[in-house]
Amino acid sequence: ALGRGGLGFLKGEEWWASSRLLDEFSFLAVTPLYENFIDSNGNWNSLDWDNIEGIEPVWVINENDQRTQLVLEAHHDTYRFAVYWINSNGIPVFIFRHPIFSNLYPGDDRQTEQYGAFARAYVELMKILDISPRIVRLNESQLFLVAKAIDNDIQYFKEQGLRSNFAG
């Protein structure tokens, strides 16, 4: 894709590609939910995600037949991600909420931790949804560990004599 900086230029590419592939593929998107941002004056602001229309928790029925919000556990319960979703023009977008995602591009070791946490949350969500993706499109550097997390999942299950849902 040709464009100048950021993800804005991908909008046209995404629309063109998605509309042409909808007959053959189902789409879903996954993203972290960032809690804070810097406004045009350089000040930090928090977003009140619990009161933004259209963003909803993902509800599941637990082992006690009670409705509860889906929470993903990763790295031996080090991370517990609350999962939300929105409908973006017919494509479900799953959103991971955790304090590790307080802001985008923190620029220190926390940024690397964000990358790893997101990758593991992605793998765990696909397993819970019982989805074996044929295509995984990673369009930002913070997603590069997803491919490694998928490989780790395949290897772990192989060593256990089992099959990962990512194994083709």
Image (cartoon, rainbow, N blue to C red):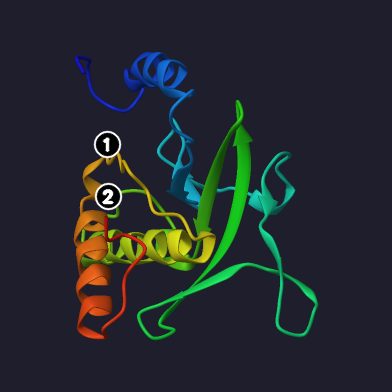
Q: Can residue 107 be seen at all in this image of the molecule?
A: no
Disc number placed over residue 139 in the picture, else none: 1
Is 102 left or right of 8, judged from the image as shown?
A: right
Amino acid on which disc 2 is placed: Leu
Q: Secondary structure at mark 2?
A: helix
Task: List x then y, in percent, for residue 114.
Answer: 32, 61
Q: Residue at x 21, y 51 (%)?
A: 144
Amino acid on which disc 1 is placed: Asn
Is 105 left or right of 26, judged from the image as shown?
A: left
Which image quadrant is residue 165 in?
Answer: bottom left
Task: List x then y, in percent, for residue 167.
Answer: 27, 61
Q: Which residue carries the number 2 mark?
A: 143
Q: Secondary structure at mark 1?
A: loop
Check if mark 1's residue and mark 2's residue have beta carbons within 8 Å.
yes
Task: List x then y, in percent, for residue 25.
Answer: 44, 32
Task: List x then y, in percent, for residue 92.
Answer: 57, 40
Which image quadrant is residue 43 in?
Answer: top left
Quadrant of the image containing the N terminus: top left
| Of 19 and 72, the residue lying toward us | 19
